[in-house]
Image: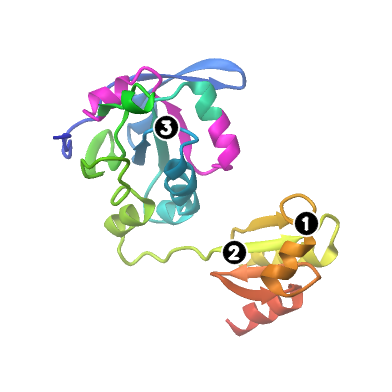
Amino acid sequence: MLPNREGQRIPTVTFRTRQHNEWVDVTTDELFTGKTVIVFSLPGAFTPTCSSTHLPGYNDLAKTFKENGVDDIICISVNDAFVMNEWAKDQDAENVRLIPDGNGDFTAGMGMLVDKTDLGFGQRSWRYSMLVKDGVVDKMFIEPEEPGDPFKVSDADTMLRYINPNAAKPKCVSLFAKVGCPFCAKAKALLKEQGLDYEEIVLGKDATMRSLRAMTGAATVPQVFIDGKLIGGSEALAAYFGAA
């Protein structure tokens, strides 16, 4: 059975990271001392569940976590520094610090190193999350020991419910836009005024006009979605905020 280390100190480890094309050693003391930190660990960078749900979930809720007393969010995986840096770029994970546990020292110290040789992975981390306060594990969510890659309890929503079950999650906002569009600039300014982060979908780069028409029924930009609801262009967005 994988150990639950609640109430225990995390392992003392030095991570080998790459910053600005230089090797930089980062210690667990630097990462955890005097801080409240969320850690989530997963089998590997660029793998399906890790890329589609696990990392994006924590990245999207980072602002809410920080509003509820969390200083940092760290993703640890048994991958090298080069892989973790490229994964961070690929995921646009600006709100999460990705730490490479290349030799598995931290993961082994947590008792979470497992054999994935059947997948050609070698030794990797079991999927889990934890809340660490000043280097001591306050809470752990360990995925059940089932075949495959279970993902039931280490997600960002579960962690947020533990920290504050009444916390308001941020609105999910997407914006279809076009380079040089003044109405798009107005819509983005309105969203910033409301303190809303948004995903920008640029026509000609991230989507086509056909995609825009299929999604919105419109042929003009901007087109804004909030929590799955189509709001419309900049004037409609202004009216939406005026009525809120």
225 relative to 211 in the view: left or right: left
In the image, residue 188 above or below residue 55:
below
Residue 129 in the image, given as x and y percentages of width and height: 31, 42
Q: Residues within 10 Å of mark 1 (few under 14, many from 20)?
A: some
Per the rendering, the mark at residue 203 is 1
Q: Looking at this view, name the residue that lies furthest to the left.
A: 1
Quadrant hosting residue 177: bottom right
Q: Closest to the observer: 141 or 61?
A: 141
Residue identified by numbered label 2:
173
Q: Looking at this view, name the residue that lies furthest to the top.
A: 23
109 relative to 99 in the view: left or right: left
C-alpha span from label 3 to label 2:
28 Å
Q: Is residue 96 magenta?
A: yes
Q: Is residue 164 magenta?
A: no
Check disc 1 and report its element: helix, strand or loop: loop
Q: Closest to the observer: 103 or 51?
A: 51
Q: Residue at x 30, y 64 (%)?
A: 165
Residue 219 in the image, given as x and y percentages of width and height: 80, 71
Q: Residues within 10 Å of mark 2 (few under 14, many from 20)?
A: some
| Amino acid type, label 2 | Val
In this figure, what is the number of numbered marks?
Answer: 3
Which quarter of the figure is the N terminus placed in? top left
239 relative to 19 in the view: left or right: right
| Amino acid type, label 3 | Gly
| Amino acid type, label 1 | Leu
Region in magenta: 86-112
C-alpha span from label 2 to label 1:
17 Å
Residue identified by numbered label 3:
44
Q: Residue at x 50, y 35 (%)?
A: 46
N-term mark: 1 or 3: 3
Colour scheme in use: rainbow
